[in-house]
Image (cartoon, rainbow, N blue to C red):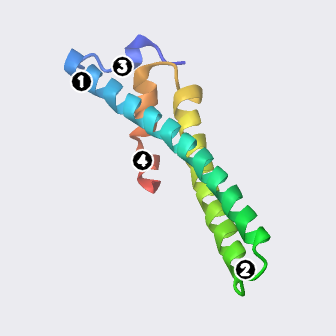
Amino acid sequence: MATQTDIPPDLTNDDKASVFQILDAQLNSTILYALLHGIYTGILVVTLWNIFINKYWAIRRALIIVIILLHTLITIGFAATWSYMHSAFISNGQSFWTVYSKISGATQAAY
Protein backbone atom coordinates (compact mmCIF):
# COMPACT_ATOMS: atom_id res chain seq x y z
CA MET A 1 0.00 0.00 0.00
CA ALA A 2 1.46 3.32 -1.06
CA THR A 3 1.45 6.23 1.32
CA GLN A 4 2.28 9.86 0.91
CA THR A 5 5.85 9.04 1.92
CA ASP A 6 6.25 7.00 -1.28
CA ILE A 7 5.80 10.15 -3.36
CA PRO A 8 9.09 12.00 -3.81
CA PRO A 9 9.04 15.11 -1.60
CA ASP A 10 10.90 17.27 -4.13
CA LEU A 11 8.05 17.20 -6.69
CA THR A 12 6.81 20.68 -7.47
CA ASN A 13 3.21 21.45 -8.30
CA ASP A 14 4.19 21.76 -11.96
CA ASP A 15 5.72 18.28 -11.86
CA LYS A 16 2.58 16.88 -10.28
CA ALA A 17 0.45 18.61 -12.90
CA SER A 18 2.53 17.13 -15.72
CA VAL A 19 2.27 13.65 -14.15
CA PHE A 20 -1.52 14.02 -13.99
CA GLN A 21 -1.57 15.17 -17.63
CA ILE A 22 0.43 12.10 -18.67
CA LEU A 23 -1.88 9.79 -16.73
CA ASP A 24 -4.94 11.53 -18.16
CA ALA A 25 -3.61 11.19 -21.70
CA GLN A 26 -2.84 7.49 -21.21
CA LEU A 27 -6.27 6.72 -19.79
CA ASN A 28 -8.09 8.77 -22.43
CA SER A 29 -6.17 7.13 -25.27
CA THR A 30 -7.03 3.68 -23.92
CA ILE A 31 -10.72 4.59 -23.67
CA LEU A 32 -10.63 5.96 -27.23
CA TYR A 33 -8.92 2.74 -28.35
CA ALA A 34 -11.78 0.75 -26.79
CA LEU A 35 -14.41 2.85 -28.54
CA LEU A 36 -12.65 2.59 -31.90
CA HIS A 37 -12.27 -1.15 -31.46
CA GLY A 38 -16.03 -1.38 -30.98
CA ILE A 39 -16.63 0.60 -34.16
CA TYR A 40 -14.14 -1.61 -36.00
CA THR A 41 -15.97 -4.71 -34.77
CA GLY A 42 -19.23 -3.31 -36.14
CA ILE A 43 -17.60 -2.62 -39.49
CA LEU A 44 -16.22 -6.17 -39.47
CA VAL A 45 -19.71 -7.61 -38.97
CA VAL A 46 -21.15 -5.55 -41.84
CA THR A 47 -18.24 -6.50 -44.10
CA LEU A 48 -18.56 -10.20 -43.37
CA TRP A 49 -22.32 -9.98 -43.87
CA ASN A 50 -21.81 -8.46 -47.32
CA ILE A 51 -19.21 -11.06 -48.24
CA PHE A 52 -21.52 -13.92 -47.23
CA ILE A 53 -24.45 -12.43 -49.16
CA ASN A 54 -22.46 -12.03 -52.39
CA LYS A 55 -21.72 -15.59 -53.50
CA TYR A 56 -19.93 -14.69 -56.74
CA TRP A 57 -16.53 -13.69 -55.41
CA ALA A 58 -13.75 -16.11 -56.33
CA ILE A 59 -11.46 -15.05 -53.47
CA ARG A 60 -14.14 -15.12 -50.78
CA ARG A 61 -12.49 -17.66 -48.49
CA ALA A 62 -9.06 -15.96 -48.52
CA LEU A 63 -10.64 -12.57 -47.92
CA ILE A 64 -12.62 -13.85 -44.94
CA ILE A 65 -9.52 -15.48 -43.42
CA VAL A 66 -7.44 -12.31 -43.80
CA ILE A 67 -10.17 -10.07 -42.35
CA ILE A 68 -10.76 -12.33 -39.34
CA LEU A 69 -7.00 -12.73 -38.77
CA LEU A 70 -6.50 -8.95 -38.77
CA HIS A 71 -9.37 -8.45 -36.35
CA THR A 72 -8.03 -11.19 -34.08
CA LEU A 73 -4.57 -9.62 -33.98
CA ILE A 74 -5.98 -6.18 -33.26
CA THR A 75 -8.17 -7.65 -30.51
CA ILE A 76 -5.14 -9.31 -28.91
CA GLY A 77 -3.28 -5.98 -28.99
CA PHE A 78 -6.28 -4.21 -27.49
CA ALA A 79 -6.60 -6.83 -24.75
CA ALA A 80 -2.91 -6.43 -23.87
CA THR A 81 -3.24 -2.64 -23.70
CA TRP A 82 -6.42 -2.83 -21.64
CA SER A 83 -4.85 -5.35 -19.25
CA TYR A 84 -1.78 -3.14 -18.81
CA MET A 85 -3.89 -0.05 -18.09
CA HIS A 86 -6.08 -2.05 -15.69
CA SER A 87 -2.95 -3.18 -13.87
CA ALA A 88 -1.63 0.38 -13.69
CA PHE A 89 -4.80 2.19 -12.65
CA ILE A 90 -6.62 -0.46 -10.61
CA SER A 91 -4.00 -2.80 -9.14
CA ASN A 92 -1.41 -0.05 -8.56
CA GLY A 93 -3.81 2.85 -8.08
CA GLN A 94 -3.03 3.66 -4.45
CA SER A 95 -1.65 7.06 -5.43
CA PHE A 96 -0.88 8.97 -8.59
CA TRP A 97 2.80 8.20 -8.13
CA THR A 98 2.34 4.41 -8.11
CA VAL A 99 0.27 4.62 -11.29
CA TYR A 100 2.86 6.85 -12.94
CA SER A 101 5.67 4.52 -11.84
CA LYS A 102 3.85 1.55 -13.37
CA ILE A 103 3.14 3.32 -16.66
CA SER A 104 6.59 4.86 -17.10
CA GLY A 105 8.45 1.80 -15.81
CA ALA A 106 10.75 -0.56 -17.67
CA THR A 107 7.87 -2.77 -18.80
CA GLN A 108 6.51 0.10 -20.88
CA ALA A 109 9.47 -0.36 -23.24
CA ALA A 110 7.72 -3.46 -24.59
CA TYR A 111 5.06 -1.25 -26.20
Badges 4 and 1: C-beta atoms under 8 Å apart? no
First in sequence, mark 3 or 1: give its number: 3
Which quarter shows the N terminus?
top right
* Amino acid type, mark 4: Ala
Q: Is 6 left or right of 39, judged from the image as shown?
A: left
Residue corresponding to mark 1: 15
* Amino acid type, mark 2: Arg
* Amino acid type, mark 1: Asp
- The picture quadrant where one finds residue 44 is bottom right
Q: Position of residue 94 (x, y in %)?
A: 51, 19
Residue corresponding to mark 2: 60
* Camera-nearest label, 4 or 1: 1
Q: CA distance from mark 3 to mark 4?
A: 19 Å
Residue corresponding to mark 4: 106
- The residue nearer to you, when weighing 69 against 58, is 58
Q: Residue at x 65, y 52 (%)?
A: 41
Labels in figure, total: 4
Q: Residue at x 23, y 15 (%)?
A: 13
Q: CA distance from mark 3 to mark 1?
A: 12 Å
Badges 1 and 2: C-beta atoms under 8 Å apart? no
* Camera-nearest label, 4 or 2: 2
